[in-house]
Structures are given as C-alpha cells and as structure tokens.
Amino acid sequence: MDEVNGDVNIDDDADALQEATDEVSQETGEESKVDSDEEKDEQTLFDEANMRKAIQLVVAR
Amino acid sequence: MFVNSGGDDTPDSAYPLPTTAAMLVSKDGRILGKGCSDYSQSSVEKAMEDAGLEITPLQQWCVTWPSSDKLRNEISKATLYLTMEPSNERHGMALPPISQLIELSGVRRVVIGCQDPIPELATKGASTLHQAGIEVTMESILAKECRELIQNYAERIMGRLPRMARKHYKLFGRPLGFLHCSVVDSDNLEAFANHGNAFGKEFDGKRLSFRDFGAYEIAPPPEVIWADSQVDIEDDLDLDDESEDIEDILSLEFEDEKMQESLNGTPMMPWYKQVDAVVATFPHPGDGPGDGEGVATRLNGLKWLSTYGTTLPPGVERILVMDATDLEDLPMSNDDPKLPRGVDVEKFFKGEGRKPTRVLLRRGRSAQAQVAAKTAAKAAEAAARAAAAALDAIETGEAESAAKAALEGQHAAIAASQLAQKELIRTLELKQKLQNMGAIVETLNGGEPIDVMKHLGSHHGYKSVVWRAGCWGSRGVKSILEGAFQWVSAHLAVDANGGKFWQLMLAERAVQGACGPESKVKVFADQEDISLEYCDEPEADGDCTLTVDGKPVRHVRLDCRVALVDSERSRDFVLHKTKPLDRKIIEEEAPWFL
C-alpha cells in the first residue's frame, strides 16, 4: 500500500524465513544458529538506539 | 564525545550525586516513561512516574498502578534502560533501595550502561536485580559513553574524604562529621598576637609548652557574618547581583588536594560542596557565642544558612538544629523585627529550587516549661500536705481544713497542667507553620550533636555532614569525645615567624588543646592540611575578626583529623632485626649522601 508497509513485508519475509528454517532444523535436528545470531544483533541495535536516547536525556539536560 | 555532566555543580543537576537517566521502552519501541535524576529524585522514580505509576517511598517502596491492566502488562514486557547501575543501598529509613523499586515495578529486562563507580557498590545493584529473576545486561551497551557521563563523579567519590566517609558510615552508621570553627586564645589575645606562640618563646609571662594550649577554646569562624550581627551582609556582598564577589572571597586559596581543587574548593567552606548536609544551630539562650542571650547573636546560624547557604549546590541540604521550645523565638516571616537585615527567611524555609530546608527539634528547655515544672512540684507539695491534713482530720475531725488543703493542691496541679498544655499547643502550631512554609520538621531523640549525627545517619543515610559551629567550649569537647566529629577545620592566630613547619606544630597543638586530652583524643595534621592567611596584608581576607588595636591578626587555617583513643585496642609491636652495614660499604658510600 505504501512505503511504511515495506517494513511489514520485511517482517513477513522474516517470519517466512523463520518458518522455513524451523522446518529445516526439525528435519536435520540442528539449532538455527544463523537465525539466533541475527536476532541478537537486532536486539543489540534496539538496545543501543534506546540507550543513546537515555544518554541524550542527560546531555540535553 | 558526550558532555561530562555527571558531576557538575549546576542548578538542575543531582550534584553531589551523579546525573543519570532512565528510560522505560515497550517491546515495540515506544517510550513509556523517561527521567533524568536531579537533587530531589532518582531517574528511575521519574521514569516510573512518567509511565503512570504512583510511587511512594515508605519502609519499602509503595508502587500503585492505574486501574487498567494495560500498563502493567506493557511494563512486564518492557525494557528499562539505565545509564548507570542502580544502587541496592538503603538511604537510612527514609529512602529504600532503587533496585527494590525496579523489582516492584514488574520490569522483566534491564539494560545498564555502566556499573556503579563506587567499588563497594559496583555490580551489587545488578546482582540484586538478577537474583530477583530480572534479565540484566550491563557494561555491554554504550558503556564507554555512559562512563563519560559520570566521569567527574567517579573521580570525586574516590577522593580521600568521600572514601573515609563511606568507611565511617559503614562502621558506625552515622556520617563523618566536619566541625568548622575557629580556635582563639581565650585568655589574652593581645599577648597572643604580640608575642606569637613559637615553641620556647615567652608567652604571657611564662615559658610556653604544649600544655598551655589547654586554655584554648574554639570560637566562631572569622567571617563578617560572625563579626557583628548588626552588620548588613548586603553592604559587603551583594548576594543577588554580584555573585562574582562571593566567588572571589571564597576562592582566595585552598589546600593542594587534587580532589578538592577539582571542586573549586573554598577556604571558608572547605568541604561544604561535597557533603550531604550543612548544619547550623539556633542555640538556646546562654549556649551561643558571646553573651549568647540576645536573639540577634543566636540567629547567626540561621543567617549563614539563608545567605551564604544559598551558594551551596541545591543537593546539599541545609539543616537548622534548635530546641522545640525555642520555636517561639524563631523568625518565620521577613516582617519579623528580630530578623537580621538582608535575610530572606521565608525563602529559606520554602527551600525553592533546592533540597527542602530541614529543621531538627531537640527537647526543649524553655522558661515556660521550667515554670510548669516548678508549678507541678508545688502542686505535689500541696497534695502531700493535703494528704497529711486529711489523715489528721480523720483523727481530729477537722474536715474543713483537710478539704481546703486538698483544694489548694488541686488548683496548683491544674495550673501546671494548663501551662504545659498551652506550651505544647503553641509548639505544635509553630511546627505546623514551618511545615506549611515548605520546611521538613523532625524531632530528635536527645539533644547533643552526636544525637543529630545518629539521626542523620539512621534516618537519611547521610555519609558526610559539616557542622558550622557557633562557639565551641566544653560542649564541643564532649561532642568530639562522643564521636560526633572526625575532622576539624579551625582558624588560629599563630606567629608567622618560623615557617610553615612550626606553624603547623603550633596549630596542631592548639587544636589538640581545644579538642580534649591526648589520652582520649588525638589530632593529626599534615603539611598540606595547613594554609596561611595573612590578614594584615592588603589583599587578605577582609572577614577576619581577630584584631588587636584595630589591626587584624595573622592566622592559619588547619583542617585536621581527630580520632578517639581506643584504650581497649591492643597494640601490636613488630620487631625487625636489622643487619649492620658492612663498614667497607659505609666508607665507600659516604660521599654520596654528603
């Protein structure tokens, strides 16, 4: 519909990738290592962005 | 590079605590609440309140959520971002640990920028949260930037005095006490000034020895505010418009201690900017400096707190200690004729823009209470007579005289009771008036400085307090021996001849004489603890009041440690066997030290 929904599409793609990976993992009996690393990076980026905002609270005081 | 604002002495900072930030972020990235610490509140409290929680510090934190479950659910999935590790330390009875507030808020995940720079507290707060089942991450997200925010604070709290204060609080549960006052010769100031006090000199017709310093007593600091209670401070210092003048006077010199230099330390207020509170008293008549009877003289402490005290950082609390029954004499409005000129007492009690003013009430010794006690004693005597008369009446049948005596006793008892009740009601009214103005009023158990220190330690967790003394005679010695003070900052008039070493010795002996017998208390001073103040020089401190023939007396300021002698403590003597040097080596090495 619009560009914002592009994010949704990416999420949908990620979900699809997750499902596919899970299926492969179930078949092979292995953990999805690639995916967990990716998740960690996202979390770190999320944390850094928020911590930066918190720091700005002190700096802009 | 981030601005280092964690230790700045700015009006809206948390100084002397670090300025930190907290931010509560929902799982989808929305900021639910945020806050920056200041002198009145922690960043976590502010962030939680911003999110919609109601928070009250009681014995434990009392946390109330809005009636809707939505916020509770969101918080339970949210992450709390903190630039610095929260403390798991309770601040006396008044403030529970911040780590407990985080636990009670229901947050499941906490990301901490950097750990607490105080070694004793580092990782303790994070560990407490982890043990409570909260997912904690520390020192992995922008840690360097977060450390830069509190760099000033981190350097300051590792200084000598803050370290001593923390250790003292841990050992005794009360703050490290700093006594700021002066030492003068109470016997003969003129001889003292003319002859000096170097060892071996004649002094007032006798050979001087350290024992002669027992005649000293500690008296008010040499500042204009103590010199003459009628002097208008605004004539000398325009507090509103020319704050630079104050800075000039306060920054004449300071001892060469890195930590204190970094605080722009001041000679008249040596530690004031880094302590939790500064205390002054409204003494009971007879307990103050000079004759002590006039209200104007007794108001010197209030005058200092409400004028010079405004230059303290907003996080350094101003405390007035007084007898509850002297509330009647305390000026509470600027219209009060007793109030010294230039003092805005309403602003002082209101405490706007800084920590609220605290008034600590000791048990009272007012004239009315004494009258009530005497009347009660008379009533008791009359009652005893009535009882004896009644006994006689039973035997003699003179019931009328027995009844008369009983009535007399009853009237005296009622009068005493009414007087005491009247005084109690009046005291409560005045106490309420102070509270309505914005002051925090608390009642003390006991009336001595050691009781004040215990109260500030146990109730508020204060670790360092400056006590600005009026006069300091036998009551001061008693307080030092009871452990109320560990440091004394004193001004002494000593001979400028002989150099710093001799002046240090003289000053140390004089303070020793003023603080108590060496068998019970020891005074320690180093070269860096003494600073010279040549008041007879044109550019010297104009506040000096030690004058002879109208001329100021040279004096020094000594910041020294005082420690109580523990007679129970065993002394360990370690003997080391030393090996005599080979004669040949001595001969060969001799020219080296020559």
Image (cartoon, coloured by chain):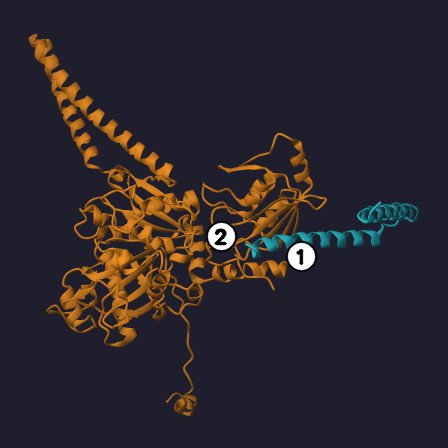
Chain colours: A cyan, B orange
Of the numbered discs 1 and 2, the one sitting upstream in the chain is 2
**Decide: marks 1, 2 in contact (CB < 8 A)?**
no
Q: Is residue B283 left or right of residue B26?
A: left
Which residue lies under the disc numbered 1? B140
Q: What residue appears at the point 64 percent right and 57 percent down from the top-left corner?
A: B139
B127 in relation to B181, above or below? above
Which quarter of the image is occupied by the N terminus of chain B? bottom right
Identity of the residue furthest to the right in this view: A27
Residue visible at 22% across and 67% down in the picture: B493
Q: Which amino acid, mark 1?
A: Ser
Say which element carries label 1. Answer: loop
Q: On screen, B427 above or below B499?
A: above
Nearer to me, B371 or B346: B346
Position in image of residue B275 (x %, y %): 41, 54
Q: Residue at x 76, y 53 (%)?
A: A42
Q: Label 2: few (<14), some or many (≥20) within 10 Å?
A: many
Do tags 1 and 2 sit on the same chain? yes
Residue A18 lies, in percent from the top left, at: 86, 47
From the image, which quarter does the C terminus of chain B lie in?
bottom left
In the figure, is residue B442 to the left or right of B97? Answer: left
Q: In this picture, is B113 found above or below B325? A: below
Q: Is residue B568 visible?
A: no
The amino acid at mark 2 is Ala
Distance between the alpha carbons at the discs numbered 1 and 2: 25 Å
Mark 2, residue position: B14
Question: Given this view, does label 1 or label 2 mark the residue nearer the observer?
Answer: 2
Label 2 resides on the chain identified as B
